[in-house]
Image: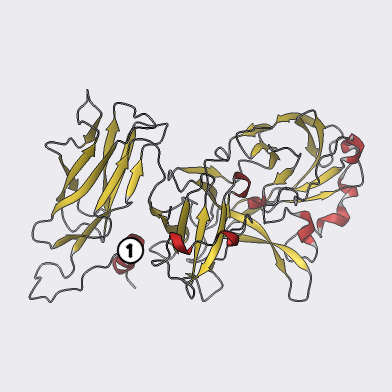
Amino acid sequence: MNNTRFYILNFLVFCSFCLLSSCSKEDQPYHQTEFVVAFKNPSESFPETSNRLDIELVFSEKAPRDGMISLSFETQNLIYGETEDFTCTPSAAENEIFVPIQEGTTGVSFQVNKWKQALPHEDKSINFSIAEIDMGEYPTHSQGNTSVKVFFTPTAALGGIQSPNVGGPNQPNQVYLSLSTKEETVVSRDTWDLGFYSGETFQIKINSSLYMFVAALPSTDIDSVSEEHIENLKHKMDFLVEGSDQYVDHPNGDIESTAIQTLLENEEENPVYLLKMGYEIGTETPSPGSVAIAGNARGYKKIRILRQEDQYVLQYADLNATSHNVAVISKTPSHNFTFFSLDTKNTVSVEPEKNNWDLNFTVKTEIQELPEGGNTAYGFSDYVEINNLGGVTAYRVHTSDFSYEDFTTENIEEDKFSSSQQIIGSSWREVTPPQREVLSNLFYILKDANGNYYKLKFLSFLNENGVRGYPKFEYKLLK
């Protein structure tokens, strides 16, 4: 399958519309198929932190020549002009904008600039529509999202297409997404090592995206622990080893199912832990369809964590050190966790505020059954977590029960919603050779912390060249 054809097929799925059948050569002497244009999303809204909004239009193929898109717009309680409510780039005149198309591009965007803030109770919006596409002799058509509604106050997005930037086959990034705002937070997954829970209890999670392990030691004196004390543990803390699942956090995200026990007020009940630091982010270029997640091993550390009123006291050191570093870490009530890097010896910013994200695209340490019996830890890529600690829930729907297109608000079943962080997980794709594909018989219903319901289906995890690490999904607001 050539790249142009692959791109067209992806575009059809993403925008949920079909190109018209190719006409005969006699009917269309210059081009066999129509050049199709659509808005990427059916709705957009200004985030609270910006007065500029980029609106994207996508093409069914690379533009065969330069051209022009004419957009018309209607406003609700808004006036155009720099001394009024908004302007556009390119500039508008008489409720019309002309957006140029450049040959060889697969899309184009224009900007809406907000000059006056809308109050929360004000209903201010603009509806842009594709009026005309001029590509000279080439046949053109607009279909799918032929209009986009722009809201001036933050409001739940109606849906659209998202392509989280996980970074290709090494998947170096963790990507946090909000479905209601479409905001994407991208963080290198080696930014942090430990996450300190901000809730009522004292829990610590390890960075499972780096394939870390942690095991309690019989000592409470961190300075007395050395390599000779842990040799019998090293071979147990690895993938495909029976029982290694006890040294990783449970992938369901239950905050009380972390490998590090709940911190206790009595200091003597909080042991020293051996921390296997996992692996650096891979740098190799794998064959198409494969991934290269893990680079060099990061070695081992020893840690001990105590409570100090409402704070954590982290003791940490290299394995054979006879003294240790200390960091006092406060809870961050607006976030699920406060994150700490043992490399930089500082707290670091990772997740958005706990009510401002729904999905995390990441690498993940899962738990698997072994063929001969027992469980083991094992690494997964293309993994999707839900923000269960932030109140997000979801469930799976099989297309044998409902089609994605026909599923409506009336079909939602409240008793099926799960708070398991792994409810989506890796269930949406098959990567065992020779099958590398999105599973088309599944989609998901998600309820966010604000009570918005969405249906969501995955479209791809490969780019047009068959390279892994390029996930795409479609979603739609139900209510």
Vertical placement of 227 versus 142: above or below? above
Q: Residue 73: give x, y in percent of width and height.
A: 19, 43
User: Looking at the rendering, in which quadrant would you find the N terminus?
Assistant: bottom left
Relative to 144, say whether 54 is above or below: above
Q: Is residue 141 left or right of residue 439?
A: left
Please tell me which residue is depicted at 56% across the width and 59% down the height of the picture. Answer: 414
The mark tally for this picture is 1
Percent x, y of residue 13: 35, 65
Residue 291 seen from this side: no
Task: Specify whether 6 is left or right of 261.
Answer: left
- Of 33 and 434, nearer the camera is 33
Q: Quadrant of residue 294?
A: bottom right
Decide which of 386, 5 is in the foreground and name it: 386
Q: Position of residue 113 (x, y in %)?
A: 28, 32
Q: Quadrant of residue 323?
A: top right
Q: Residue at x 21, y 49 (%)?
A: 129
Which element type, helix, strand or loop, lies under badge 1? loop
Is the residue 314 above or below the residue 181 in the image? above
Can you see residue 365?
yes
Q: Residues within 10 Å of mark 1 (few under 14, many from 20)?
A: some
Where is residue 151? Give x, y as percent.
33, 40
Q: Residue at x 44, y 46 (%)?
A: 180
Please say if 73 is above or below 312: below
Q: Which residue is mark 1?
A: 16
Residue at the top extreme of this rendering: 83
Structure colour scheme: secondary structure
Could you tell me the amino acid type at mark 1?
Ser
